[in-house]
Amino acid sequence: MSKKILIVEDEHDLVRLIKYNLEKEGFRVSSVTDGSLVLAEIRREEPDLLVLDLMLPGMDGLEICRQVRRHDRYAGIPILMLTARSGEADRVVGLELGADDYVTKPFSMRELVARVRALLRRHEATPQRNSVQRGDLVIDPSAHAVSIAGKQVELSALEFRLLHHLASYPGRVFSRDQLLDRVWGNDRSVTPRSVDVYIRRVREKIESEPQQPAYLQTVHGVGYRFVAGME
C-alpha cells in the first residue's frame, strides 16, 4: 500500500505543487493549511510522514513538532520540516524539537521527493531485532518502544534508531561519521553536528542526569558509546 503524506503548509500554490509531485510518485497526499488543525488531521489520517512548514497560522511548526513528539502513538512519525530560514541556528532548533530532516525554501520538487523517500526508507530500515535490555533500559524494536524502569520514553524515529544502534553494541565507540553512515545512511543531508544534537536529545529523555550520562557517554575526540550494563 502506498505511503500517506500529510502536508502542513499555508501557501496554497506550494501545497498544490508538492501534492502533485508526491502523488505523481505514487504517494497518497492530504494537506492542512492551519496549524491548529494538524493534530486532529494526524489522528484522522495517521500519516506515514509529515511535510511541515515552520511558519503557520494557528500553531507554528515548532510547536506542532513538540506536540507530535509528546504523543505516544504518533511520536515515531518522520517529520520533514520546510522553512524559509536558512541559518544553522534554525536548523538546529528544528532538529532539537524532533524534525528528522530540514529543507529550506526555495527548493526543487526533485529534492523534496528524494528527501521524503529517504526518510521513509530510514524509518522502515529500523532494525526489527529482538528487544535490547541494558540495566533498567529496555528497547523493543517491534513495538518501537523504549522504557526505563518500566516507564515509557517517547522517542522520534531517528532518536530511536540512534539509541538502538548504540545499545546493540555496548562498549563500542562510534565516531560521528560512523553514526551518520549507520543511522542516517547514504541519503543523509545532515552534518556531524546533527549527531551531537540527537545525542543530546536522547540523553535528555533517558538520562536522570544528562550532564553525567549513565547510558550514552562521550569519548572526547572520538565519538560516543553506550556503556550501561558493561560492569
Image (cartoon, grey):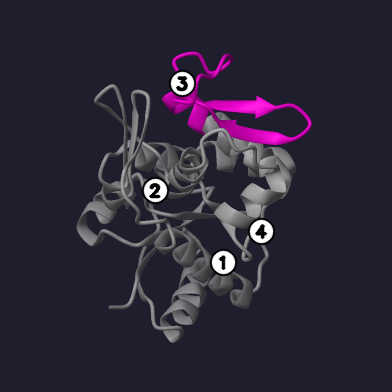
**Residues at marks 2 and 4, CA–CA distance in whole angstroms:** 26 Å
Disc 3 on helix, strand or loop?
loop
Q: How many numbered discs?
A: 4
| 13 inside magenta stretch | no
The three-letter amino acid code for the residue at tag 3 is: Glu
N-term-proximal mark, 1 vs 3: 1
Disc 1 on helix, strand or loop?
helix
Q: Residues within 10 Å of mark 1 (few under 14, many from 20)?
A: some
Disc 2 on helix, strand or loop?
helix
Question: In front of the other: label 1 or label 2?
Answer: 1
Q: Is residue 154 left or right of residue 143?
A: right
**Does the rendering let one see residue 82?**
no
N-term-proximal mark, 2 vs 4: 2
The three-letter amino acid code for the residue at tag 1 is: Arg
Magenta stretch, residue numbers: 202-231
> On residue 189, which mark appears?
4
Q: Is residue 160 left or right of residue 110?
A: left
Disc 4 on helix, strand or loop?
loop
85 and 151: which is toward the camera: 151
Q: Which residue is mark 1?
A: 115
Q: Which residue is mark 2?
A: 35
